[in-house]
Image: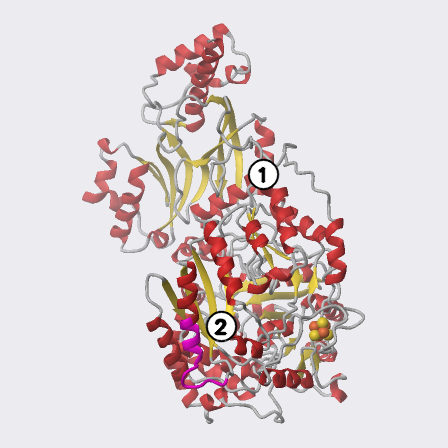
């Protein structure tokens, strides 16, 4: 297999795309299993059908990645959907889409696995296949094409995807998928063919294939795999790899519970993740420790479908706050059921930081809530919001749906009850309300699977009423595009015919339609595909299903039986509640068994066995007491100035992402770094300049301040261990400074840079440029720049504010973008020789004074080479940063001595 190295393959052209580092891999925690000659590993990739920034926020991807890579015979790498600009680069360079870890072309894999978290992800999946040069349709693929496998909560009706996917895993990956793949890997090792591997796959009871039958595979229905060890196993470290750039959800995630006890009748996820299983507090604490100390997260989400239903959620939050307060770690609960949300819980949430308040109401009408099997007491909501206001919240989000199967009358419509409820609530609380309303899609495998979906026109009328009747200022109303739910329904409720409609729409150009703006733009293409389908697609999507017709998803079971869904539907009609799930429940749906069941009774006991919290912070001081990491009242602080390189892909990491990497590395390193004050404390970190994207650098300068000194070798080692391999520190200088004077900022000391410009093949000699009027401006003596040309390499020294004009002038001269002209490497960051009026004479005087009087605690500085000024190689214009800071260190040392003697 010929591996693709994107850095070599695309070179500086990578900066022509947005977020180039999302195509280069190399993240901390990525797993690279080197390829060997005669390698027999089962080559797989986990593909997320959306872009890197969304995919790397997804937990399922990382769980599968970690779980499969634990198996010694499996190599699992990652691939995400490319954006349009990168698609163009792939096409221009005739490069097939590849995996991030070792650059395996997708076409050469044994198996490509899609995690379909939402149905509209299918357009992203097709994009991945097409860019991987793999035929989209199953029937067109050959023996040497990979097996195309899928799974996830968005693929529980595999019928619309049956023309694309060879097989679909139903259920939780930890419930048997890793062992299944291990078996397949062994088969590959023993020389099995693709056909034999596919047959083995089809025999797994959790796997759906298009032509399943008892005779052929031993089962005619695929059953959902349930992870039995959720509450007993050590959780998979799904925080790794750490993304190269800021992702959509840029915080640590600990899954505190799986499943939800509430049984809302419209909720597909509520069925998919049954039964409710909570993790013990001890497990949660251990995992949070890893998120803080190994991943460097400062914001952590305690996730589940309904986190407020975790047993003793208030106690858990309180203990976490107590333990991590001193490290400024904050905790969020992303989804809260209104009636499980209590005032004490609000108290805990307000402890560290104000995250948003979100309430999923769906419908405010109490009779209709009984139909949904959901209770939202209006008075409770008002009490919560009034209390939240006292604690500093000034806005809250509310989620509603229209199109639910309710018996509306002219006086009582969904939209009217939503508007009346919100006007009343706002009047009683005075809070600014963000109201979000979506259109209900009757999902497969729920008690509402048979009902009709409202048309886009009906939906539009309802949403317009809500927008028009909630006054701006007090309300901000967000509504989904009515047509998006239409296409989503095609992918979630459709039958096998939908597959070819999706295929045709893709061929017409629809891309990444899980994004509402893409979908809106692509609607005419979808309409064309509908009109060419040969059946009335719209009518089929919207129609009510009869209770005795065979549904396209009937060959999949998520656990509950059809009779359970029917019973629940009848209770809906009678406005009857079904009690919440609990151990030994009396309304069995068919999911709990002696192997796996609701465990809240066990967990609630374990809560009190969790680790004894001492109330001490990491410095062995009472938590919440004086934090030494704040700069206040520290008479002597230490400054570390350091040099780092950005190479081997580091040039494609933006400056902001580099800062984020350093922030995390500092937190993980345990170095005694001082943090800023406020709700979001950050290390006191400074950079001399911002490196342009695409520029390799051998000499970037940065500094941090610390409340204790440490030796330079261990400073470098500790940080390098936590930084990615493409950003590494190679030199540090640490010296004491007094807090009684301003520090010389690195950027104020910046003079300019020395570069190597290597001209690309086919670019004519740069001499011609220097003969133009524009070129002469740079070689003119007064410009302070200098150039030396050897072959196609131009060495240049430029004042920092000439960087951009010089590149612009080259672009103008050659009529091309800079990345098409040269590859740029920074050799040196140059400092001003003198700052703040410190003449070389004054420096010398300080140096001699210190030398003659001696200086306790500054021996190391005395040894510094700056004390031999005759060796100072600085030119008239600029000097080396470390030369300059050696002198600054001397001045600080003198001032400290002076102060100590007073
Ligand atoms: S068997 Fe009962 S407790 Fe278990 S998931 Fe079903 S309804 Fe809930």
Q: Secondary structure at mark 2?
A: loop
Query: Relative to 787, is 207 on the left or the right?
Result: right
The front one of 673 and 620 is 620
Residue 685 at x, y = what percent? 47, 36
Q: Which mark is residue 326?
A: 1
Residue 364 is marked as 2
- Which of discs 2 and 1 lies nearer the camera? The answer is 2
Do residues under tags 2 and 1 come within 8 Å of each other at their CB atoms?
no
Question: Disc 2 to disc 1, how far (Cα)?
Answer: 41 Å
Vertical side of 253 occupied by 753: above or below: above
Q: How many marks are shown on the rendered structure?
A: 2
For ligand 1, the image quadrant comes to bottom right
Residue at left 54%, top 67%? 377
Position of residue 83 relative to residue 328, above or below, is below
Q: Position of residue 588 (x, y in %)?
A: 73, 77
The image shows residue 549, relative to residue 527, as above or below, that is below
| Relative image position of residue 735 (x, y in whole percent) | 50, 23
Residue 801 at what x, y percent from top left? 29, 38
**For this rendering, which residue is in front, 517 or 866?**
517
Lower position in the chain sequence, tag 2 or tag 1: 1
Q: Residue 451 colored magenta? A: no
Please provide the residue range marked out in magenta.
407-420
């Amino acid at each position: 297999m010929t591996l693709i190295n994107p850095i070599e393959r695309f070179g500086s052209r990578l900066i022509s795309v947005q977020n180039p580092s999302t195509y280069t891999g190399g993240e901390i925690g990525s797993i690279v299993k080197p390829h060997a000659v005669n390698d027999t590993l089962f080559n797989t990739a986990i593909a997320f059908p959306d872009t890197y920034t969304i995919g790397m926020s997804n937990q399922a991807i990382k769980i599968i990645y970690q779980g499969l890579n634990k198996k010694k015979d499996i190599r699992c790498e990652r691939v995400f959907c490319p954006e349009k600009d990168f698609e163009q680069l792939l096409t221009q360079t005739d490069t097939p889409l590849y995996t991030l870890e070792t650059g395996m072309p997708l076409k050469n894999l044994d198996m490509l696995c899609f995690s379909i978290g939402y149905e509209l992800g299918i357009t992203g999946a097709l994009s991945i296949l097409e860019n991987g040069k793999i035929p989209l349709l199953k029937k067109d693929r050959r023996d040497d094409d990979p097996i195309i496998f899928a799974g996830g909560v968005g693929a529980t009706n595999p019928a619309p995807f049956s023309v694309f996917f060879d097989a679909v895993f139903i259920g939780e990956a930890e419930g048997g998928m890793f062992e299944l793949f291990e078996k397949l890997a062994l088969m590959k090792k023993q020389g099995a063919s693709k056909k034999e591997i596919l047959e083995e796959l089809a025999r797994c009871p959790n796997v759906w294939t298009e032509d399943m039958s008892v005779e052929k595979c031993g089962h005619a229905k695929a059953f959902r795999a349930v992870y039995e060890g959720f509450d007993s196993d050590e959780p998979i470290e799904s925080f790794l790899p750490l993304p190269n750039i800021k992702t959509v959800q840029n915080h640590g995630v600990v899954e505190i519970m799986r499943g939800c006890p509430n049984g809302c009748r419209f909720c597909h996820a509520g069925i998919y993740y049954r039964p409710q299983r909570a993790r013990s507090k001890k497990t949660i604490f251990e995992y949070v420790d890893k998120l803080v100390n190994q991943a460097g997260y400062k914001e952590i989400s305690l996730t589940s479908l309904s986190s407020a239903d975790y047993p003793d959620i208030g106690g858990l939050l309180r203990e976490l706050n107590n333990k991590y307060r001193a490290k400024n770690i904050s905790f969020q609960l992303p989804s809260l059921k209104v009636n499980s949300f209590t005032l004490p819980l609000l108290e805990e949430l307000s402890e560290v930081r104000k995250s948003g308040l979100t309430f999923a109401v769906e419908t405010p009408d109490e009779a209709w809530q009984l139909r949904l099997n959901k209770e939202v007491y209006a008075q409770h909501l008002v009490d919560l919001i009034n209390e939240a206001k006292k604690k500093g919240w000034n806005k809250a989000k509310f989620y509603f749906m229209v199109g639910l199967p309710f018996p509306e009358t002219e006086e009582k419509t969904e939209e009217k009850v939503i508007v009346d409820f919100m006007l009343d609530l706002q009047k009683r609380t005075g809070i600014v309300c963000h109201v979000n309303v979506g259109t209900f899609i009757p999902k497969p495998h729920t008690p509402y699977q048979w009902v009709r979906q409202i048309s886009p026109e009906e939906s539009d009328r309802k949403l317009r009423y809500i927008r028009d009747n909630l006054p701006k200022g007090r309300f901000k109303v967000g509504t989904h595009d009515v047509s998006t739910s239409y296409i989503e329904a095609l992918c979630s409720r459709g039958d096998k015919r939908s597959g070819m409609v999706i295929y045709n729409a893709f061929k017409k150009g629809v891309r990444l339609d899980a994004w509402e703006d893409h979908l809106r733009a692509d609607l005419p293409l979808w309409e064309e595909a509908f009109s060419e389908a040969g059946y009335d697609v719209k009518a089929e999507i919207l129609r009510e299903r009869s209770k005795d017709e065979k549904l396209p998803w009937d060959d999949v079971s998520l656990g509950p039986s059809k009779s359970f869904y029917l019973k629940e539907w009848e209770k809906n009609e009678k406005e009857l509640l079904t009690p919440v799930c609990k151990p030994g429940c009396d309304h069995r749906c068919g999911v709990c068994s002696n192997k796996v069941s609701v465990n809240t009774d066990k967990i609630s006991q374990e809560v009190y066995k969790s680790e004894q919290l001492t109330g001490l912070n990491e410095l062995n001081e009472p938590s919440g007491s004086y934090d030494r990491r704040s700069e206040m009242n520290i008479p002597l602080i230490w400054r570390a100035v350091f040099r780092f390189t950005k190479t081997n892909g580091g040039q494609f990491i933006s400056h902001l992402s580099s800062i984020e990497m350093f922030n995390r590395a500092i937190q993980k390193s345990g170095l005694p770094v001082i943090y800023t004050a406020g709700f979001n404390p950050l290390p006191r970190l400074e950079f001399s300049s911002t490196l342009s994207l695409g520029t390799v650098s051998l000499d970037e300068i940065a500094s941090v301040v610390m409340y204790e000194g440490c030796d330079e070798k261990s400073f470098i080692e500790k940080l390098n261990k936590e930084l990615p391999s493409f950003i590494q520190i190679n030199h540090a200088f640490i010296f004491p400074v007094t807090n009684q004077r301003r520090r010389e900022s690195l950027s104020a000391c910046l003079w300019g840079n020395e570069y190597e410009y290597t001209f690309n093949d086919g670019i004519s000699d740069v001499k011609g440029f220097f003969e133009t009027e524009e070129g002469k401006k740079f070689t003119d003596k007064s410009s302070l720049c200098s150039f030396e040309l050897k072959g196609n390499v131009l060495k240049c020294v430029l004042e920092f504010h000439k960087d951009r004009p010089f590149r612009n002038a080259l672009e103008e001269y050659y009529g091309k973008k800079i990345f098409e002209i040269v590859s740029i490497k920074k050799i040196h960051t140059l400092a001003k020789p003198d700052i703040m009026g410190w003449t070389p004479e004054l420096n010398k005087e300080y140096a001699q004074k210190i030398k003659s009087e001696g200086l306790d605690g500054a021996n190391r500085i005395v040894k510094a080479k700056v004390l031999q000024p005759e060796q100072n190689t600085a030119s008239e214009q600029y000097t080396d940063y470390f030369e300059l800071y050696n002198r600054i260190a001397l001045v600080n040392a003198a001032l400290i001595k002076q102060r100590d003697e007073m």
